[in-house]
Amino acid sequence: MSQKKNQSMNLISEHCIWIWRIRAGIGLVFLSMLLGGLFVFFPLTAMALEALLLILYFLLIFLYIPGYYYSCVCYLKGASVIVNKGFFIHKYSQIHFSNIQYCLISQGFIQKRFKVCTVYLMMAGSRERIYEISLRNAYELKQKVEQAEMAQE
Amino acid sequence: MIKEERYKKTHPFSILKNLKLSVLLILFSILMQLLFNPQGWFEMISALGLNAIYAIVVISYSVTLYRKSRYRLGEDRIFLRGGILFQKDYSIFFDKMQTIAFHYDLMASFFGAVKVSIDTPAGSSRKCDASAYLSKKKAEVFRQLIMKGLPHTSYYRSGPLEILLASLFWSNPASGLLFVIPVFSRLRSLLGKEKTSELVKESLNPGGEILASVVSPAVALVILLILACWVISIVLTYQRYLRFTSYRSGDYLVITRGLVSPATVLTRFNGIICVSEDQSLLMRIFRLHSAGITVIGSGKLKGDKGMMIPPVRKRELDQKLQEVLGILPREEKSLRPVKGSWWSYLYYPLIWVGLMAVYLVLNFVFSLGAIAEMLFPAAVLVFLVLLWWVAFRIFAYHRAHLAVGNRHLILCTYHKLTLKRYHIPFRKIARIEMTQSIFQKVSGKCSVKVYVYYEKNLVYTIKQLNLKQAEELLSQLPLK
């Protein structure tokens, strides 16, 4: 399946790039505060670490995060959900609705702003996380899983 | 999406429970006292102000968490919502629930609350999939929805004597110590270190005086502490399992137990991973057996041993297992460890017995010093325990076997100091592995490991079986 077709069917929201960038920014601020404390005792070391942190931050927000987003595809195929993800190590999962015990939808305060959430597909012995899926898609997926369960009964 | 108003709030007792979890944060106040050590009026008022802000934050968090935690009972599922920073929304079908537990804790019951815990095969082995405090009325409504008003059958109630026997066999000083330590530290904070030590010494003195005539005072104190912890453990286990009752209701096995903090556990029959018949060496002497079940969600209730039937005679146990769980005592084919493989069962405890025996002989003959002399009585006790361990391993070797029943694989092996005879339904077997060490390859033996469907890695092992006979026996299993 071509990448364009994948992206059009993709349940993962395009806002996820900005959400991850915001998280990276929060992480940068937090680590910088710690390095600020270290600066009092070891100024040169703290400055070197801060420079390294900034380089990593820019690589993260301009290279890794967009690359990770385009590698993540999640779509419905019949009575299964297909999850493709991973930048360095690619993973492919096909999960049949009948194997899902229940769906858990979790929404953080940043996700609330962009109207996305994280869906946890809980299975016997394992679970699959789908990040930054739009709320509408999340509830549709949950409904499909529940319909499959009711059909099974 | 269902409107928020139709969701109901959990019981307000949840606020107290959330506050209890933040008790560790009281370290903040203590740290402030230690680091800043306020002296003047202004500093003390500032410190009090900061403590007040901290308390307001903690209480606000607990109250907000309670207000956000909501539930709704549907015809075939329960809907749950909660969380402050990360809001969660999920629903669990009744058919997916393997174990539902209703805990009537002493404190919660005082406020009219019941803790309901739900476990599914998707859950973690450490905590439940969902738990909430509901009012007693709502909890009863939930229970009726699940059980659908089906009649109770195969009713079994154990007497107080059977529970007392179970408490005697299952208790140990370590579990008593786990209860004593927090009580002791709370007493110290209330009464002070010296007063508490005085109190403990006074209570142990009478027994100590008797024992001090036989052993040194230090050893006497240790023995008394061990005995005291053991008695406490017996009392705790006894009250935990008193009024034990089990019965069938539709697809569920219902177990109720407990005096001070009773609990009712509903378990799906098709969720029972295995049934085990347990017998320790002491129980063997009294010709008693007990039975327990392993299910998803078992072991999370405090002190839960998954007991199904307390110590009774073999005939009564077989009768109850057949009535309640449909397990027939008959085995069609059985395979025992190869003759002469007793060394594999005994080498480890025998090494320790040997080392202890050497120490005792050397101490007795050569007198290794004052400390060694003081430790001699304790060493004798340890030696006797090690001999008990050897005796148990001999018993386990004679009883070990692998067999195929009509619907179960039967595996008799030991776990710590208990002989366990596992009845594993064929459909619960995830896989079977036969392993051979270098020595076993030469002698044609193997160890059989049976993996079962469970929240975490759960495997039952029997060793030193003949490889060809084991292969022949296991090939007859109707596994898909």
Image (cartoon, coloured by chain):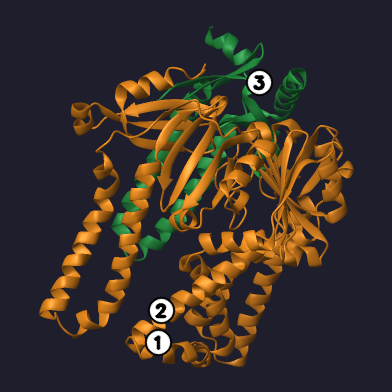
- Tag 2 residue: B223
Q: CA distance from mark 2 to mark 3?
A: 59 Å
Residue at 33 percent across and 49 percent down: it is: B394
Inspect the image, locate mark 1, and give the three-letter code of the amino acid beneath it. Leu
The green-tinted chain is A
Instruction: Measuring from the top left, give residue B193's x and y in whole percent.
Output: 49, 88
Inspect the image, locate mark 2, and give the three-letter code of the amino acid beneath it. Ile
Q: Quick one: A24 or B262, which is closer to the camera?
A: B262
The orange-tinted chain is B
Instruction: Measuring from the top left, give residue B385's x and y in whole percent.
Output: 34, 64
Q: Are marks 1 and 2 on the same chain?
A: yes
Q: Are marks 1 and 3 on the same chain?
A: no
Q: Quadrant of the N terminus of chain B?
A: top right
Which chain does the numbered disc 3 sit on?
A
Q: Is residue B319 left or right of residue B125?
A: right
Q: In the rendered structure, which disc, 1 or 2, sits on the residue that comes first in sequence?
A: 1
Instruction: Check disc 3 and report its element: helix, strand or loop.
Output: helix
Instruction: Measuring from the top left, give residue B40's x and y in whole percent.
Output: 57, 92
Answer whether labels 1 and 2 touch (C-beta < 8 Å): yes
Q: Which mark is residue A97?
A: 3
Q: Quick one: A26 or B435, which is closer to the camera?
A: B435
Residue furthest left as drawn: B366
Residue furthest top as drawn: A1
